[in-house]
Amino acid sequence: MTPVPQISGPHMTGRAWLLLLALSVLWGGSFFFVGVAVHELPPLTIAASRVGLAALALLAVLRLSGVALPRDPLVWRAFLVMGLLNNVIPFSLIIWAQGQIPSGLASILNATTPISTALVAHAFTTDEKLTPNRAAGVLLGLAGVVILLGPDLLAGLGGNVMAQGAVLVATVSYACAATFGRRFRRLGVPPLATASGQLLGSSAILLPLALLAERSWLLPLPSLPVLAALLALALVSTALAYVIFFRVMAQAGSNVNLVTLLVPVSAILLGVLVLGEALSLRHFAGMAVIALGLAAIDGRALRLLRR
């Protein structure tokens, strides 16, 4: 009998951290693109356009690369669940919330995702238990995000409880998706096929919802800036981003959601490099605290110090 290959526990390598940084740049742009589109389009229509266009793009990539989608009905049921948890629920809630609260506050609330993820992984996995280092690192990272984006944004807390609660519910959905998505590696589904399958599953849910609830076909044609934002949101911040997301998840498990701590850092640095914005002492302090938190989660720096 051929021995079953053993799958090592989730862990972050140097390559995984680099991919996570790249993912933070791609997802950092999504808040901007949604901010443009939300002025002319309703939330479900934006979310459906995002996943539908991204699914079409990845299907073309699959065809060109020769990677086949699995035929197993169990895998497709998993794609539907993953699409619901990772796209349908969080995308709809966050897009709706961005029409009610500032993007900066939405980013801070979204950065609580690693806290939700650590708790869900601790409850439902055997190899991602919450350790003191991980708990301290996640809290430090969240504190760094608050410092980076500005404590003044926290003054808006409680101003629109429904919208802020929607973002927090979205983070719990992301956390459940990160834990649920670990099964695709065990099922032998490659990251590109996983990304495509869950986007197809999301499209199958969101497209009918948008048509029924918002009558998308009756909406006026969006302006060119909104169309450009939708394309960028779908192709860059969704299709390409999910290929990276599932590649990291296959190795690092629910650690992939640490990306939400890096998204604000990428947004600030892009503003400096592209728009010529200046860095203040607060920005340096926030990034330093985030780096300290990530180092605590990674653990290698602490092990070196102990030696």
Image: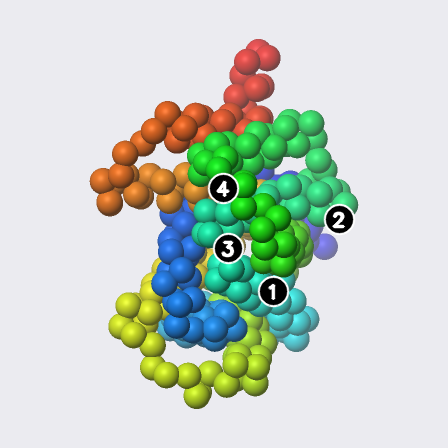
Question: What's the CA distance linking mark 2 and mark 1?
Answer: 20 Å
Q: Quadrant of residue 73?
A: bottom right
Q: Amino acid at mark 1?
A: Ile
Residue 101 tag number:
3
The residue located at (34%, 77%) in the rendering is 222
Residue 294 in view in this figure: no
x, y percent for residue 259? 50, 44
- Circles 4 and 1, Cβ within 8 Å, touching? The answer is no
Query: To which quarter of the image does residue 218 belong?
Result: bottom left
Q: Nearer the viewer, mark 3 or mark 1?
A: 3
Q: State how far apart marks 3 and 1 are (Cα).
A: 18 Å
For the N terminus, the image quarter is bottom right
State the residue in front, 1 or 41: 41
Could you say which is closer to the camera, residue 292 or residue 276? 276
Q: Which residue is mark 1?
A: 89
Q: Which residue is mark 4?
A: 153
**Dot placed on the residue nearer the N-terminal end, 3 or 1:** 1
| Colouring rule applied to residues | rainbow
Residue with the most extreme bottom position: 218
Label 2, on which residue? 124
Q: Earlier in the sequence, mark 4 or mark 2?
A: 2
Q: Nearer the viewer, mark 4 or mark 1?
A: 4
